[in-house]
């Protein structure tokens, strides 16, 4: 898919994949025996007599439709591909469904040639018609997708013109140079012969039927992809099973079909603790290493016959944010007007940021395996600007926080409770996803830190679906702890910073099919960041682009739409029976899944 930021419902929103973006934000949705009725397919088991890889995820998939996906991890890194992909080691854009490309007219014309004989997982031919259809869906305003914002070009947000030259050649014509375009062609290609009718037809509300197509209630046999694997079973609350796609195009140098691993099993677990225990007991082949498990796992590497891979600084972000939305829906404010006044006060946000003890988070929650974070752009990105370049940072300073609050008109009562000018107690609800131990610990510390400033925080971890509904549908939330996936190309975060971006979460506007908002407005600094992201994508020269993105980082740290917390190390444990791992923070352990084998 295109390298859009993804909420970690969303680990980054990869990657929402390489720079595809939003931080892993997933939880378990338990579906018991009573919900399965008498359908025996729910009791299907993974095959044990074939080479297989057993992994884990914290929640059930939300959709089997790659266009509609807003979460990471997701199934699509296994089941779909684009014209290009990213080399997980070098970060270079490399061929995938397209065997080659040509760039002309100062980068405004890109011509791709598809590989000969491509097929879908149902055996049907994959042609340029599928590519044209995919981009028509992407640019369809009636279909909400995180990926669209990454293709907006120039101040008018124009999209590329996509033309069919013949059954193997497709051409993109851009209105002006657009630096991220080549990388963006990693967008997952979807099958026109299956999905075209669902775009043309509408439901009772007048929305394309595509929006309800390939939900998780669809039989896996109906999901047609082009990636190395296809879904063969889905048992809600238990597992997703993938099998080799017999029509996948890749072969090794000896002409052997890839991938080599016959089956991949995603065990759906309830928490990161559960995944850790399952890995230690031998039930999983890989697990993300939580900081509090690192020392124990490190001691067990030899005995457990696994390797802990360290990719260095991670690509994602962890942040705390207030809902800055000042709009109303059906006459009711999205955020209580009293609290909205606090949240939209820059001095209040800066005071809160000074009141969060990030170094204690590093020491206690991350066990020293991270550093305070000061930017929305990933540390490994060449466009990352450190504090040494004038980017504001917020070292823990509760005295300065109190001074800012008092100067902004807040006051303290005799009990040390923070009040606003009208005497209202400063109190709000903080949400995150339950089951993610790191984020739950961060939320608990923020609650304690801000209590020292006289602020009462009601911390409420939520189930995944409830969290997504509040952040993207009802928009009724006050504060959150979340994360976004990242990458080396900052334009992957355009869907966060454009005013109508699908992940402009701190001030989200209504999306397609939702009730409109009345009185939605954007601050001047907010508009400036959006303009800078548009301008930076138009510039080819690296130094000029860097300076534009440096200014965005200056603004995000000054006005704090997100208060960035900790950049943790990218750590994953993989059993040594898995051969061919080339681990990096960019690609993780399985970016080259087609090359991996199991002993």
Image (cartoon, rainbow, N blue to C red):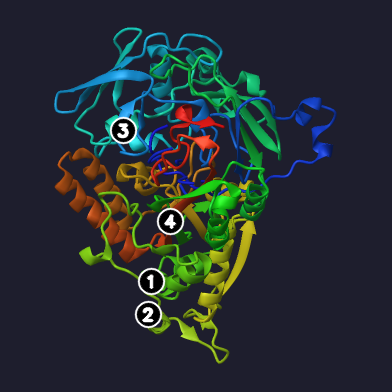
Q: Return the x and y of residue 346 as percentages of the image width and height.
A: 37, 69
- Which of the two labelled residues, at mark 2 and mark 4, occupies the earlier sequence position? 2
Q: Residue furthest front?
A: 303
* Residue pictured at 51% horizontal, 40% vertical: 70
Q: Return the x and y of residue 465 as percentages of the image width and height.
A: 63, 46
Query: How many marks do you count on the picture?
Result: 4
Closer to viewer: mark 2 or mark 4: 4
- Image quadrant where one finds the N terminus: top left
- Which of the two labelled residues, at mark 2 and mark 1, occupies the earlier sequence position? 1
Where is mark 1, residue-wise? 350
Where is mark 2, residue-wise? 404
Q: Secondary structure at mark 4?
A: strand
Give the Cα distance between marks 2 and 4.
Answer: 33 Å
Q: Nearer the viewer, residue 480 or 388?
A: 388
Marks 2/1 in contact by CB < 8 Å: the verdict is yes
Whether residue 508 sits left or right of residue 177 in the image: it is right
Marks 2/4 in contact by CB < 8 Å: the verdict is no
Where is mark 3, residue-wise? 183
């Amino acid at each position: 898919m295109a390298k859009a930021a993804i909420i970690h419902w969303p680990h980054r929103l990869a990657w929402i994949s390489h720079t595809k973006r939003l931080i892993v934000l997933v939880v378990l949705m338990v579906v018991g025996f009573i919900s399965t009725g008498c359908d025996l397919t729910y009791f299907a088991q993974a095959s044990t007599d074939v080479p297989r890889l057993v992994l884990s995820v914290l929640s059930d998939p939300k959709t089997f439709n790659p266009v509609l996906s807003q979460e990471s991890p997701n199934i699509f890194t296994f089941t779909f591909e684009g014209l290009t992909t990213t080399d997980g080691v070098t970060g270079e854009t490399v061929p995938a469904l397209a065997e080659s490309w040509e760039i002309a007219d100062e980068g405004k014309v890109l011509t791709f040639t598809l590989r000969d004989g491509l097929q879908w997982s149902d055996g049907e031919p994959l042609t340029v018609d599928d590519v044209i259809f995919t981009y028509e869906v992407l640019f369809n305003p009636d279909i909400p997708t995180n990926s669209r914002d990454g293709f907006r070009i120039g101040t008018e947000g124009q999209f590329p013109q996509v033309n069919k030259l013949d059954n193997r050649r497709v051409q993109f014509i851009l209105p002006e140079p657009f630096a991220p375009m080549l990388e963006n062609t990693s967008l997952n290609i979807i099958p026109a012969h299956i999905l075209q009718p669902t775009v043309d037809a509408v439901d009772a509300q007048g929305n394309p039927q595509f929006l309800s197509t390939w939900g998780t209630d669809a039989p896996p046999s109906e999901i047609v992809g082009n990636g190395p694997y296809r879904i063969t079973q889905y048992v809600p609350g238990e597992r997703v099973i993938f099998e080799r796609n017999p029509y996948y195009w890749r072969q090794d140098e000896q002409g052997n079909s890839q991938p080599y691993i016959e089956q991949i099993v995603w065990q759906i677990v309830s928490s990161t603790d559960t995944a850790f225990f399952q890995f230690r007991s031998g039930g999983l082949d890989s697990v993300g290493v939580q900081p509090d498990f690192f020392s124990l796992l490190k001691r067990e590497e030899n005995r457990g016959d696994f390797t802990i891979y360290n990719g260095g600084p991670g690509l994602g972000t962890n942040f705390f944010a207030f809902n800055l939305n000042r709009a109303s829906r059906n006459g009711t404010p999205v955020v209580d007007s009293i609290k909205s006044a606090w949240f939209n006060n820059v001095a209040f946000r800066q005071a809160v940021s000074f009141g969060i003890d990030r170094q204690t988070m590093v020491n206690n929650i991350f066990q020293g395996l991270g550093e305070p974070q000061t930017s929305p752009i990933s540390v490994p990105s060449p466009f990352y600007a450190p504090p040494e370049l004038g980017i504001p940072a917020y070292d823990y300073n509760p005295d300065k926080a109190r001074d800012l609050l008092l100067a902004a008109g807040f006051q303290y009562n005799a009990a040390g409770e923070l009040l606003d000018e009208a005497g209202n107690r400063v109190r709000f609800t903080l949400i995150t996803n339950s089951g993610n131990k790191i984020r739950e610990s961060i939320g608990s510390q923020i609650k304690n830190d801000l209590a020292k400033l006289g602020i009462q925080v009601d911390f409420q971890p939520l189930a995944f679906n409830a969290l997504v509904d509040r952040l993207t549908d009802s928009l009724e939330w006050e504060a959150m702890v979340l994360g976004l996936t990242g990458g080396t190309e900052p334009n992957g975060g355009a869907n966060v910073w454009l005013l109508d971006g699908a992940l402009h979460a701190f001030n989200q506007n209504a999306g397609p099919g939702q009730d409109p908002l009345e009185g939605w407005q954007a601050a001047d600094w907010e508009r400036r960041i959006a303009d800078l992201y548009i301008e930076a994508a138009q510039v080819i020269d690296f130094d000029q682009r860097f300076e534009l993105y440096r200014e965005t980082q200056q603004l995000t740290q000054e006005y704090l739409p997100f208060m960035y917390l900790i950049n943790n190390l990218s750590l994953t444990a993989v059993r040594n029976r898995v051969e061919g791992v080339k681990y990096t923070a960019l690609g993780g352990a399985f970016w080259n899944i087609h090359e991996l084998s199991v002993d």
